[in-house]
Amino acid sequence: MTPAHITGSQSGLTLIEVMIAIVIMAIINLMAWRGIDVLSRANTTLQLHSEEDSRLVRALQQLDRDIAWHTTVELPPRTSVGEHLQPGDLLPAGMQITEFASGQLRMTIVRAAPAAPGQWQQVQWWLQGGTLWRAAGLPSAQYPLPAPRVNARVAVLDGVASFNLRVWIPSRGWQTLPRPRQSPSAATGLEISLAVRRNAGPAQPYRRVLVFN
């Protein structure tokens, strides 16, 4: 056997070396696939949370607009008994909070109709079956305004565990609706509290405070 022949044999790869190389490549591919899968899952989760946050923001913005456009001087002022406003009269004119038999709240707002200048409409918000609903009545220039129809309701936000409202009374602090105590002054602010559940996780609290003009 010549030296050249010996050198050529030693320069090749044995079967064991080839198998080891294949195993290493398989491990590297598996690690890369798992990394890509983790990134994909993380991206999907971020997109889902972003969509949920966007829906929550849109719901609060719509609620803000309804309250900001509520009627003021167009309705008669609140009545009072003696020196104290009655609990139902603490809110500004055009706003009313009622309670269903289930204990859930319904907020009714009389607001300017954006598509009908000079006219007004009733808008209602309530929680039912884990969904925050909104319904708007037909615009009108005469009172009483048409009440919102149930079949015209729109599902604004899903996965809502609770929907609570409180008003800020000067010198009295926060009062829970719909049954606050009598007060010598009307409410100057409104607190909206929502608990929204993400998938099967725990409900996350959200709080919005609005100041009445």
Image (spheres, rainbow, N blue to C red):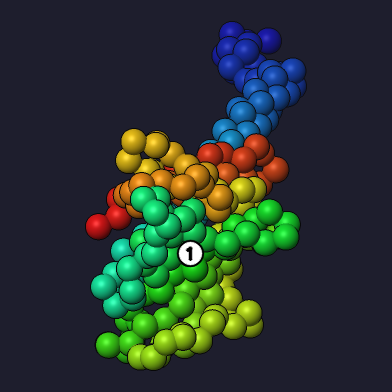
The residue at the point 62 percent across, 40 percent down is 203
Mark 1: give few (<14), some (14-19) or many (20+) Cα within 10 Å: some
Q: Is residue 147 visible to the viewer in this orientation of the structure?
A: yes
The residue at the point 63 percent across, 82 percent down is 151
Q: Quadrant of residue 207?
A: top left
Lateral position of residue 194 relative to residue 27, left or right: left
Q: Is residue 47 visible to the viewer in this orientation of the structure?
A: no
Decide which of 48, 83 is in the foreground and name it.
83
Residue type highlighted by circle 1: Gln
Q: Quadrant of residue 148?
A: bottom right
Residue 85 to residue 96: above or below: above
Residue 162 to residue 6: above or below: below
The residue at the point 62 percent across, 13 percent down is 10
Decide which of 11, 82 is in the foreground and name it.
82
The residue at the point 66 percent across, 39 percent down is 201
> Can you say which quadrant of the picture contains the C terminus?
bottom left
Mark 1 lies on residue = 96
Q: Position of residue 98 (x, y in %)?
A: 58, 62
Residue 43 to residue 81: above or below: above
